[in-house]
Image (cartoon, rainbow, N blue to C red):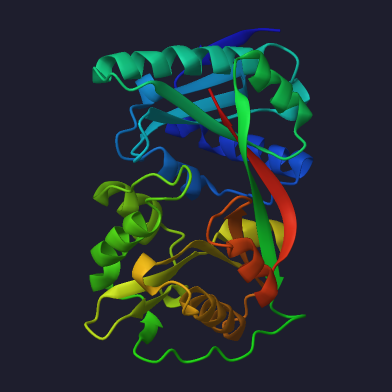
Amino acid sequence: MDLQTRPLSRADLPAWVELLEVCALVHRTGEHYAVEDLAEDLETPGLDLDRDTLAVLCDGRLAGYATLAVRETTEPVFRIGLDAAVHPELRGRGIGTTLLSWAIRTAEARRAAAETELPLNLRTGLPELDLYGERLLARHGFTAVRWFTELTWDLAENPPGPAPELPGLTLRTYRDEDEEPLRLLRNATFADHWGAGQWTVEQWQHYKTRSRSFRPDLTWLALDADGTPVGLALTQYFEADTAATGHRDAWIDTVGTAASHRKRGIASALIRRVARTAADLGFRTASLGVDSASPTGADTLYRSLGFEAVRGFVSYDR
């Protein structure tokens, strides 16, 4: 067995898609990717392929990868996010250890280069019940710190009813001029949420409003009498998921309400409108993720609307 390492490149995209598809089948993650999705990831703001990515090849075949990205956060840490995977058929050959050892060394070097006194926080995640990955992370000093649940609403079996009107508020879909106000609303809304971080303008545009997956027609917001956004339900659609499952899913990526307007049914009304619009457009399901320890009671709200748990994920810190 011949293991080689080098940075990721665009030439790896087809093999990367194949590797992640095998991981999705084995771990039932429900996450599928097209070449275009991963190409977009390689264009992440601030990502230096030579510095921040690693590909491990086994006998010339892509066997695993890792990418690192600095995350802005209100917490007193220097946070770096780690995304990595090993081909399930090639586990137990030292590939995971190679990736994690590289990630730890590189993250420590990034912190040193930043000349910060903040402690390094390296964060990654795994599908629930990935025992191999859990043991591997534990051997490298990672600890499980938070649990998340993905929930899905079957819009065909449980059609969404009409959403209530909200006195004093206007509810409508996304417009181009909403891009920056919604970023500011999202950052303010999630400032007290565990691990949520703060999106820069570049990151917000890249990952959200200018991503190929963004659906402005399925993104709903609430505005007060002055036209200021006070609630949002930002939605994405991934074509690769449809190719794998045969049906379309509206992924409600971000749900938030300004602190001054909570407990008024805004989140519920926005989600109902996303679901109703998605159903009218022929989407079979709507899905979202929730922090098991969310301080807003989001899990209870989502289940009351018709969402049901389908899978879990775990966040790990080092």
Classify 18 as above or below 105.
below
Classify 68 as above or below 108.
below
Where is residue 250, by image quadrant? Answer: bottom right
The x, y position of residue 164, in whole percent, is 52, 91
Between 60 and 171, which is closer to the camera in this rendering? 171
- Observer able to see residue 302: yes
Where is residue 9, by image quadrant? Answer: top left
User: Could you tell me which residue is drawn at 71 percent across and 26 percent down?
Assistant: 134
For the N terminus, the image quarter is top right
Q: Would residue 175 be found to the left or right of residue 14 on screen?
A: left
User: Could you tell me which residue is drawn at 61 percent across and 82 percent down?
Assistant: 279
Q: Would residue 179 be found to the left or right of residue 41 on screen?
A: left
Give the number of marks.
0
The x, y position of residue 202, in whole percent, is 27, 48
- Observer able to see residue 60: no
User: Could you tell me which residue is drawn at 31 percent across and 65 percent down?
Assistant: 182
**Residue most extreme to the top:** 2
Between 257 and 277, which is closer to the camera in this rendering? 257
The x, y position of residue 142, in whole percent, is 60, 22
Q: Would residue 279 be found to the left or right of residue 116 on screen?
A: right
The x, y position of residue 286, in whole percent, is 62, 69
Classify 299 as above or below 82.
below
User: Could you tell me which residue is drawn at 33 percent across and 39 percent down?
Assistant: 72
